[in-house]
C-alpha cells in the first residue's frame, strides 16, 4: 500500500515539474523549430508523458526497494546516480542530434533530475 501511495504522490508532483521544465521554461523557443515537434493534441502528449512518469517512478521505487535503500540521503544518491547513468547522457545526446535550442537540453535534463529526486523523496517518505 505504501508503494502505491508513493507512486501516486510522486506522479502528481512530477506532473507539476514536467509542466515547468518541459513546457514553461523556454516555451517561446519551441516555435523556432516547428518541424521538430509532432503534430497531435496536447492532451495526448501529456497523457503519454504521465504514463511514462508512472512507469519510471514505479521502476525507481522498485530499484530502491531491491537495493534496500533506507533514508533520504541514500535515496537521493540513487536518484542522482540513475540520472547520471541514464537520463543525462540520453538527454544530452538527443540535444546534440536534434535541431532544437540547447536550452532544451538543459531544461529537459533538469526536468529528469527533478523527476528522479521526487521519486526518491516519495520512496524515503513512504517506503520504509
Image (tube, rainbow, N blue to C red):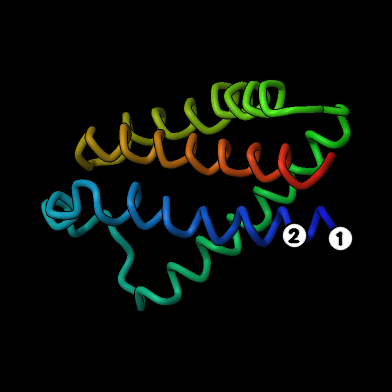
Q: Give the left or right position of residue 128, taking residue 9 as reference.
A: right
Residue 124's place in the image compared with 28, above or below, is above
Q: Give the left or right position of residue 67, taking residue 40 as reference.
A: right
Q: Position of residue 124 (x, y in %)?
A: 72, 37
Q: Residue at label 1?
A: 1
Q: Position of residue 50 (x, y in %)?
A: 54, 63
Q: Looking at the rendering, which quadrant does residue 19 occupy?
A: bottom left
The kind of secondary structure element at disc 1 is: loop
Q: Residues within 10 Å of mark 2 (few under 14, many from 20)?
A: some
| Residue at position x 62%, y 29% in the image | 79
Q: Looking at the rendering, which quadrant does residue 61 occupy?
A: top right
Name the quarter where the N terminus is drawn: bottom right
- Name the foreground residue: 104 vs 63: 63
| Residue at position x 85%, y 37% in the image | 65
- Name the foreground residue: 45 vs 124: 124
Q: Residue at label 2?
A: 5
- Name the foreground residue: 74 vs 24: 74
Q: Looking at the rendering, which quadrant does residue 67 occupy?
A: top right
The kind of secondary structure element at disc 2 is: helix
| Mark number, residue 20 | none
- Name the foreground residue: 57 vs 4: 4
Q: Give the left or right position of residue 126, taking residue 18 as reference.
A: right
| Residue at position x 43%, y 34% in the image | 91
| Residue at position x 67%, y 62% in the image | 8
* Tag 1 and tag 2, C-beta contact below 8 Å: yes
Q: Give the left or right position of residue 89, taking residue 122 as reference.
A: left
Amino acid at each position: 500500500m505504501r508503494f502505491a501511495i508513493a507512486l501516486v504522490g510522486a506522479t502528481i508532483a512530477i506532473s507539476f515539474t514536467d509542466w515547468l521544465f518541459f513546457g514553461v521554461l523556454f516555451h517561446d523557443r519551441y516555435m523556432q523549430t516547428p518541424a521538430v515537434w509532432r503534430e497531435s493534441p496536447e492532451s495526448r502528449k501529456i497523457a503519454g508523458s504521465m504514463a511514462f512518469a508512472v512507469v519510471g517512478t514505479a521502476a525507481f521505487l522498485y530499484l530502491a526497494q531491491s537495493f534496500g535503500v533506507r533514508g533520504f540521503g541514500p535515496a537521493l544518491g540513487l536518484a542522482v546516480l540513475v540520472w547520471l547513468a541514464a537520463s543525462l547522457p540520453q538527454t544530452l545526446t538527443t540535444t546534440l542530434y536534434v535541431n532544437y535550442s540547447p536550452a532544451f537540453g538543459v531544461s529537459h535534463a533538469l526536468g529528469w533530475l527533478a523527476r528522479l529526486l521526487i521519486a526518491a523523496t516519495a520512496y524515503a517518505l513512504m517506503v520504509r
